Amino acid sequence: MGQCTLGWVGRVALGCALAGLAQADSDRMARPLVLGLNGSGVMGTFKADGPIDRRNEFFKSLGSNGRSCATCHLLEQAASFTPSHARQLYRQTHGADPLFAPVDGANCDQVARTDRAGHSLILQHGLIRVANAVPANAEFAISVVRDPYGCALRVDPKSHVLTASVYRRPLPSTNLGFLSAVMFDGRETLVPLTSADTLDANLRTNLRHQAIDAVLGHAEGATGGPIELSGQLYYPGINDSLGAEPNGIPFTPASMTLYSTWEQRSARRQDGRVGAARADIAAGENLFNTLPMAISNVRGLNDSAALGKPTTFVGNCASCHDTPNVGHHSLPLPLDIGTGHSPDANQESDVVIADALAQLSLPDLPVFLVSGCPNPFNAGQAESFYTTDPGRALISGKCADFNRIKGPILRGLAGRAPYFHNGAAASLLELVNFYDRRFKMGMTREQKHQLVAFLNTL
């Protein structure tokens, strides 16, 4: 499908739906294009290979707690869900809705459904608890220095292994044909999504495994819009910003061209509200493609051998969001841009990151102290640091993976606030303010308005 915003491509169904498809009666099938309203306008979901069948397994309860995939992935909310939706459900059901199942729908698993305070993270930030076993062969030591809910780091009573609880937004379960990694920390990427020859088969393998784990664990000329997205050219490594494009085509930072025709017209006079809105959107797309960013202290970039491990380099939005007109990285590239760092100024040594975090509506999350790892930016120096989410390191056990999280696809942003893996940005303006401070972009108020206008159309 595709959304204007998001989408399912014809050759790849929703991840959970791969658990099995039901034969549908024609009179029970929806149209292939579903439109929904949000605060920024109209968003569409488009299924390229036919009507959306709301009787297939994606919409059915597949476990024992009443949840379906659609419990957390609503087509009308960019195949994720918003905190306002969660709050409305909580009011209507007093916490009885399957969304609030104790396994991961509360701050900790022993919270009563009627305990509203114990559901603060899902109600205020749309966060789901993810319990990860700390790798037995980990290269690091981990401890907790702040535990507001009592389950940040503990020995799981069932598995008897040390488990860290982190809190993350549900990724959109659409646009799967563009994925280079499955899940924020890549844990469901069992086989690589790096070759066009094996992409379809490997993606299906990964999504089948993800679907099983989900069931077991919890279910005018502008070329925007879901129908256009369904025909977008893509292959692993397309426009790769680190030089791994398989056809040797040079990287271009102009990765977004949805509104290039509006940009051409914006130089001329635009009369009326529609013309002014289009001019802002086109200007925002141009900012996305051209505005320079001073990138420093980013794990995955500044310590990358492919880039020569630069202390600082000038990039732009496409340095990370390089897939044309999609806004994903076309090869796996989990990064640490600072969103998982501790918001306590006494625990964050990088003043630039601390300033950027101050722009966000950060949830009150557990804070872990990580020690025993080398500093990736100062060879030979050891480093201890604080984090609310160790990211991929909880899967690999590698110091090099600390805090590294994949960036989600940008299509469908308007329908799935709040943003970042931990729901730290309550709005797109907060997200833009974070990037402005984090990467010293020096944006004016008008530029921020224009960039938000563009992001709201994806």
Image (cartoon, helix red, strand yellow):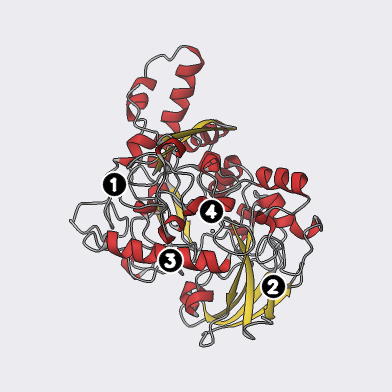
Of labels 4 and 1, earlier in sequence is 4
What's the distance in space between the residues labelled 1 and 3, CA to CA? 20 Å
- Give the label on residue 152, or none: 2
Of labels 4 and 2, earlier in sequence is 4
Three-letter amino acid code of the residue under disc 3 = Gly
Q: Are marks 1 and 2 in contact (CB under 8 Å)?
A: no
Q: Are marks 3 and 2 in contact (CB under 8 Å)?
A: no
Outermost residue to the top: 271
Closer to viewer: mark 4 or mark 3: 4
Res. 445 image quadrant = top right
Outermost residue to the left: 247
Kindly identify which residue carries mark 1.
Answer: 252
Three-letter amino acid code of the residue under disc 4 = Lys
Three-letter amino acid code of the residue under disc 1 = Thr
Kindly identify which residue carries mark 4.
Answer: 60
Q: Residues within 10 Å of mark 2 (few under 14, many from 20)?
A: many
What's the distance in space between the residues labelled 4 and 2, CA to CA? 32 Å
**In the image, 243: left or right of 26?**
left
Q: In the depicted view, which residue is nearer to us: 38 or 243?
A: 38
Closer to viewer: mark 4 or mark 1: 4
Kindly identify which residue carries mark 3.
Answer: 300
**SS state under label 2:** loop
Q: How many marks?
A: 4
Q: From this view, report whether residue 187 is shown above or below residue 264.
A: below
